[in-house]
Image (cartoon, helix red, strand yellow):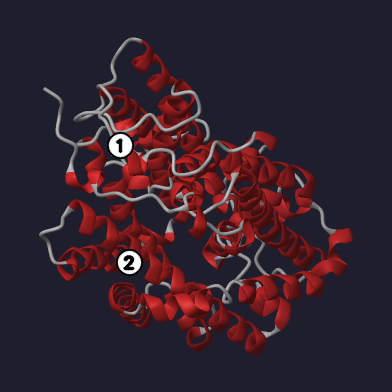
Amino acid sequence: MASRLPDYIAAAQPVPQSNRVAWYKSTAQTYAGIMLWFVFWQDIPTGGGVSGGALSQGLMIAFAGLVLAALLCHFLYYLVPGMLGLKTGLPLYIVGTSTYGATGGFLMPGYLMGVLQFGWLGVNAFFSAVLLCAPWVGGPEAALGTPAHAIVATVWAVLAAFMGLKGIQYVARVASFLPLIPFAILLILFFSTIGGLGSFDGGSLAGNARAAAGEGSASALTIWGVMAFLLTYIIGFFATAGAAGTDFGMNNRDSKDVQLGGMVGIAGATIFAGGLSLLIVAGACGLGKIDDPTKLQTTTLMGNIMGTQTASVFWYLLTIAAFPPACFSAFIAANSFKTTLPKVNPFISVGIGTLVSIILAVTGWAGDVVSVFSIIGASFGPVCGAMAADYLLSGKKWAGPRAGFNPAGWISWIAGFIVGAFNSVAALVEPLKEYATIVPVPPLMAFVVGFVLYLILAKIGLQTRTLEMPATTQEAAPEPTA
């Protein structure tokens, strides 16, 4: 007897071609807004706090890692979800049922995407509160751990969650324009420090940082260390947005829109924001405007570069631009929970999630962005990998929902998550600390494990059967050109 198609899949309606829009009206501008978020680019030069940071081997190596990471985000993590969205006109939580099953798809990737939004809300609240408190306490670093920071972070998270539930339409009206704020600030900082680029020396920066840190400080990153940090940081940050490419692709007209939207909004914006952040710090170093060479966060250096008053204005403008993403995190989570937990009041589910966000922000856990991005990359790296494998095995199209829990998808995700999260977990467990760096570029390895294992498991027959879809949900878009 054929399995009954779950109601949430049977009721899905594809976005019609008449409602599709150009790449520059949807995909590119939305992704560019994500990559221009100050939380992304401010820590790129730091290298995770190691002496000399990502600039210890010079600008060329840092830019090589940045460009490679940007291209991997586009081609490995975004392109297949984007094409699946284009070809079906359906959102991620429906398209994902091919990889994880009609029953399993209830949890993966839709529910997981919703849960992780509260991690993003916590990160947003933590860093926004830092910049909001900074002018009153002597800078961003002085704000950490203060009662004022905890109060502001709590209020920020609550307001963002409320607006995400009840007022997202008002936020959306201005959200498209607010990325112009960090865009302009980055350019101003760049032109203010460009004169120091000719004097910048990565080796000297690393040496000065070790001297300032004293004995026992970590040595500078090697060339591979710089590349690995940038790949881990950028891919980890982007992984959930890559899977969400399905939701962007379903609003695109053709494959050209999908490609251009990603190349401009993902690769281009990543290189622009991350590259300017590196150049600003390098230029500030060359001009002698770095008091402490162990502290290379771009937003922290704004006071040295522009003066305290101008920096305070920049900090507040950056937080204004960061508020819509916080609201959208709550909105995405609410939509996920409405689909997967239809009988639970969204105010209850989102309220519980917001409480978790507040705890992450107030305790400072959300401030350890390298660890946060690694866990997020471990969660969605294998999702993107398995979706890519499923797409190729199905002849570059959506196979349709599979019955129950699809073993190939779930086993590949579990294995990929274990590999991707191993370093972060090992760092917290005393007997395993010596192995805390054994997995190179964890978010990328999570993708590779998810991709390869899904291929193998599918080939040996560990896929459930495909369920028949209503005709209205099949291939909403004409077959795109290559």
Q: Is residue 424 visible?
A: no
The picture quadrant where one finds residue 338 is bottom left
In the rendered view, would you say 272 is above or below 425?
below
Residue beneath disc 1: 97
Q: Is residue 154 left or right of residue 139?
A: left
Viewer-closest of 113 and 8: 8
Viewer-closest of 167 and 470: 470
Q: Is residue 262 visible?
A: yes
Viewer-closest of 365 and 93: 93
Q: Amino acid at mark 2?
A: Ala
Image x and y of residue 379, in percent: 36, 41
Q: Give the residue drawn at x 60%, y 61%.
A: 32
Q: Give the residue drawn at x 27%, y 56%.
A: 336
Q: Closer to the camera: disc 2 or disc 1?
A: 1
Q: Amino acid at mark 1?
A: Thr
Task: Mark 2: give few (<14), some (14-19) or many (20+) Cα within 10 Å.
Answer: many
Image x and y of residue 137, in percent: 48, 85
Residue beneath disc 2: 330
Q: Is residue 340 left or right of residue 42?
A: left
Which quadrant, please, contains the C terminus?
A: top right
Asked if disc 2 and disc 1 are in contact, CB closer than 8 Å, the reply is no
Image x and y of residue 94, in percent: 32, 43
